[in-house]
Image: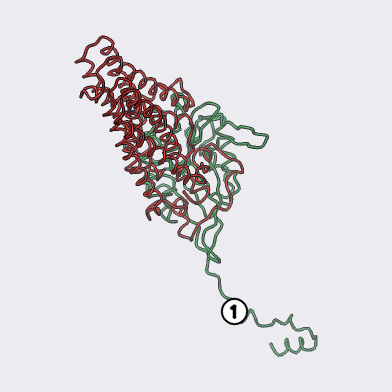
Chain colours: A green, B red
Amino acid sequence: MTELPPPSAKKLGLVIDLDTCVGCQACATNCKEWNTGGHLGPLPDLHAYSAGAEGVWFNRVHSYEAGEGEAGRTVHFPRSCLHCETPACVTVCPTGASYKRAEDGIVLVNTDTCIGCGLCAWACPYGAREMDEDEGVMKKCTLCVDRIYNETIPEPQRQPACVITCPVGARHFGDLGDPTSKVSRLVAERGGYDLMPEMGYAPVNKYLPPREKPAMKPASLEEAAPTPLDIRNPLLRWLDRALSR
Amino acid sequence: MNPAPSIVLFTTASGAGYGLLFWLGLLRALGLVPASPAFGLMALLLALLLITFGLLSSLKHLGRPERAWRALSQWRSSWLSREGVAALATYVPAGLLFLALLLGNAPLAMLTGLLAAAGAVATVWCTGMIYASLRTVRQWHHPMVPWGYLVFAGFCGAALLAPLAALWGQARIPAIIAALLGAGAIALKRAYWDSIDAPKPAAAPTIESATGLGRIGATRPLDPPHTEQTWLTREMSFRVARAHRVKLRRLTLTGFALATVLALFALPLPGALAALLLVPAAAIACAAILAERWLMFAEATHTVSLYYSGDA
């Protein structure tokens, strides 16, 4: 089971737009909300109401500063499982609990057979897996496998919780194996990229870079020239207006 | 990486046990240690005790130890699974060796001893490869790591076999092996530390490649995603050792050197006197390897730290 299936034609994943993400944490919060009652729920919280509160989340939103001076940007950066095409978290698993679905490429954990050794989390360069220390098993993003195929909810809602809740539309879900899909076209148009491509795990999820800022124009001489309002003396102001006609 | 006591103890104790089993099986077959079944049984029992203690300790590291048997299934892809299979398989010749020694069946003892030695090497190699196969931890994904596991296990095993053999008056060969491997351990560890202390290769992941923001410029963390620790930060971003690494490294090397020197001093001495030096030598060798193993975890950095501290 932990041997990888042959590459699937369908590669479900997310496209995250770092240009529009505002770092509001809604995706992380709705992820926790849905998944604590979903396929891998509950997602425990330890010391939830005291110092040292921590818990299992599938999605973490970092903020970074990139570049210096005028070129510098603050970028909000959601981090979750990238559902890699060649995930080491799957092949290192000694029990077969960690697996990649042959039909759509989603990487999942079978919590009924996981022994909680933690090796998959060591093998993941992206920190996508978190141990449920209550249950003693590993948990991770399921790409909301219990929403996207769920026929009991209206069709427009059959999307991952993080995608459907994003208030700025910075998250997109679709089939990245199909070059004509909306998400694939978005990646092509905007130059979507892989995180840590040098690790060689071929992430399916893509990130869209922040758009380049328009170059700042130096203040022009016209702007520097006095306007009629700058002339305090009413007589001179009238004269200026009369001569400007 | 967090040096979980259960794993540090496991790899050290079972490493020592497999080392002892290896030298017992090999040297007994070659007639270089006492042929007495009592000696063989004593050494074998100590080896199995250490191995079993180590394996039980590794179970403590699991979230669901009662499911540990499932770890035997994925040997085709997982080094951890291979280690489990090799560890259990080694019990078969080791158990038969025990019976052969008990019944005084010399040919069977020789054959099972050699098979158990092979199993011991395979198991320790798998342990090393669990770490060496992880591309996410630069200090582990290193060609010296699995060889290090073999050398340290062999060193500790020979250091343990020597005092036992001394009691039967034939400690010479295991003591020489312990001294040689002690010197080898010092050389290997120094070369390894030099290698991991060298500047990171240009191709190593950076915060810029981890976020893809290098296209804008140098990147640094601004706000973390959470104000408290998580399992991930506790497991992957362990930093206590950095402060004491120099002292701990020196202590480790001193321990290796001391055990080596004691083993050499014991060479000309008769049985019981040699044992007086070889017992502390074995204890010091094991303690130094415990420190080495703790450092191997504590000094290792995981790429996930890039997202948190910008460095790994």
Q: Quadrant of residue B265?
A: top left
Q: Nearer the viewer, residue A49 or B50?
A: B50
**B63 shown above or below B196:** above
User: Which of the 4 quarters of the picture holds residue A54?
Assistant: top right
Left or right: B12 as drawn, with respect to B231: left
Q: Residue A26 location in percent, x, y?
A: 60, 44
Q: B203 or B254: nearer the eye? A: B254
Vertical order, B212 against B286 (above or below): below
Q: Is residue B94 above or below residue A179?
A: above
Q: Secondary structure at mark 1?
A: loop
Q: Nearer the viewer, residue B57 or A36?
A: B57
Q: Position of residue B240 (x, y in %)?
A: 53, 42
Residue B73 seen from this side: no
Amino acid beneath label 1: Ser
Left/right placement of residue A68 relative to residue B40 reads right
The residue marked by circle 1 belongs to what chain?
A
Residue furthest right as drawn: A234
Count every numbered label the image shows and give the total: 1
Residue count near mark 1 (Cα–Cα under 10 Å), binned few <14, some 14–19, many ≥20? few
Q: Quadrant of the N terminus of chain A?
A: top left
**Image quadrant in which you'd find residue B281:** top left
Q: Is residue B244 left or right of residue B257?
A: right
Q: Identify which residue, B67 or B278, lies in the foreground.
A: B278
Q: Height in image: B227 above or below A224? A: above
Q: Among all residues in the image, which is located at the extreme top?
A: B103
Residue named by callout 1? A220
- Residue A160 seen: yes
Residue A111 in the image: x percent, y percent?
A: 47, 27
Q: Position of residue B28 (x, y in %)?
A: 24, 22
